[in-house]
Image (spheres, helix red, strand yellow):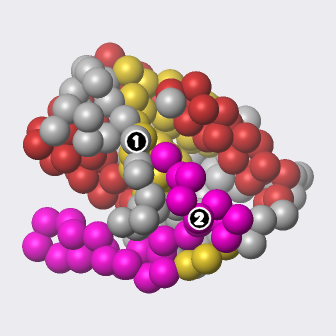
Amino acid sequence: MDKFDEETVKLPFGKKDLDAVLCFPTSVRTDVHTAVILTHGAGGDMNFRHLDYLKTLQKFTIKHAFFGGRSMGCRAAAALARRLSDESEDGVQGVICLSFPLHPPGQMHAHRQRSEDLRMLPECVRVLFVSGTEDNMCDRDLFDGVLKDMKAEAEVFWLQGGSHGLTVKGRSEESVMDEVNLKVISWIKKEV
């Protein structure tokens, strides 16, 4: 398994900066062309186990940038991708949403406001959603409506039995993470 170098970085987001970690394989010093920038959810931090941070430094020539996150981090990633795609058509290639929080549990009325940035992403941006079939923050009927309203091309991976935290009863966290990571990596490879 590769060893990784890390560097703490700040990403500008609105009027504040988001903490992030830049990680890249030690063995790959200059031949990195794809960056995945992930943000954490409201209840997590930069060390949340579902997030691997692969970001860009000046020493890399990044040709493909993907923004993503888990839960609230999905909303931040979509907002950042929307802003950057408004500035440059090739600024962002895709958005990865792990457990998009379409609404608080039982409060379906919040879905329009929470999905605004997704609905405003341009056609040139691709979106991957990874959500659990038992996620109490993502009503499937409301979610289907958001997908229909989006200009961006979207793909959805439903994790069978998965909760909002992407846990599945009767399965180890490692097996779930392997399944999710395989899906995300294969999607990225298909998009670049």
Number of numbered markers: 2
Q: Secondary structure under badge 1?
A: loop
Give the main secondary structure, helix, strand or loop, of the magenta stretch. strand
Highlighted range, magenta: 7-33
Q: Marks 1 and 2: which is nearer the front?
A: 2
Q: Position of residue 115 (x, y in %)?
A: 27, 40
Taking 46 as reference, is 83 above or below it? above
- 107 or 29, nearer to the observer: 29
Q: Position of residue 136 (x, y in %)?
A: 52, 48
Q: Residues within 10 Å of mark 2 (few under 14, many from 20)?
A: few
Residue at 56%, 46% (x, y): give it: 135
**Residue that label 1 marks:** 63
Residue at 31%, 41% (x, y): give it: 92
Q: Quadrant of the N terminus?
A: bottom right
Q: Which image quarter: residue 133?
A: top right
> Is residue 171 shown left or right of residue 105?
right
> Is residue 158 shown left or right of residue 37?
right
Residue at 49%, 46% (x, y): give it: 34
Badges 1 and 2: C-beta atoms under 8 Å apart? no
